[in-house]
Amino acid sequence: MDVKQVRHAYASVADLYIELFGTSRQVHADDLAFIGQHLSIRPGAVLDVGCGPGHITGHLRSMGVDARGIDVVPEFIAHAKAADPHGMYHLGSMNSLGVENHSVAGILAWFSLIHVPPQELDGVLAEFHRVMTPAGALVVGFFDGDEVAAFDHKVVTAYRWPVDEFAERLARAGFSEVDRQQRPSVGAHRPCAAIAAVVGSADNR
């Protein structure tokens, strides 16, 4: 993934992106429920990796979660800090999260992995696994499709994944799926999916 390209692409539309997606009210209720179900019950820090303007980080914090936002786009981090001055938001990359081994109870990667080329996904998931506690929870949102394929996302090239194949990638990285949801295309909205997984065996939930 060309981090500089992604950063520049989102920085160039940051104001519009924040206007369209900058609050949790603009997130589908089913998605918020899915995220909350799997990330609000665990003590310890939860990283919102690719947090954008911090809207879901703030939502989790309103639920009492020790949620912290990370993003590569300075404009998003500046907005998140202004909107939620008591929260923790900082610039960082999913390729190197900058936290200690086994120190994070949960990770949210909500449509932030969509720009990771398929050949680089295993490395990102390995970094997620490195920082998570035993039985830590991971929630991932992504675009659904019949095959792994690139498409012309409105901001920068993105990838769609068959849900089963994405789950296999998670298993390869040491995660066990515990839940999933799928939503078909509606109007201009593409088919999307989400998977919740835990480190190690699902029996350790």
Image: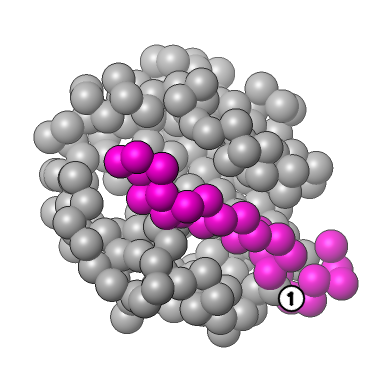
Q: What is the number of callouts on the image?
A: 1
Residue 88, can we see it?
Answer: no
**Residue 143, horizontal then vertical, whole percent:** 40, 57
Quadrant where the image shows the N terminus:
bottom left
**Residue 42, horizontal then vertical, whole percent:** 78, 46
The answer to whether 68 is drawn above or below residue 118 in the figure is above
**Residue 189, horizontal then vertical, whole percent:** 36, 43
For disc 1, the neighbor class at 10 Å (few under 14, some 14 to 19, many from 20) is some
Could you say which quadrant of the image residue 39 lies in?
A: top right
Magenta residues (range): 177-205
Q: Label 1 amino acid?
A: Gly
Please give the residue where the numbered disc 1 appears in the rendered image.
Answer: 200
Could you say which quadrant of the image residue 63 lies in?
A: top right
**Residue 132, horizontal then vertical, whole percent:** 65, 62
The answer to whether 72 is drawn above or below residue 1 in the figure is above
Residue at figure coordinates x 59%, y 27% from the top left: 59
Magenta-span inclusion, residue 105: no
Quadrant where the image shows the C terminus:
bottom right
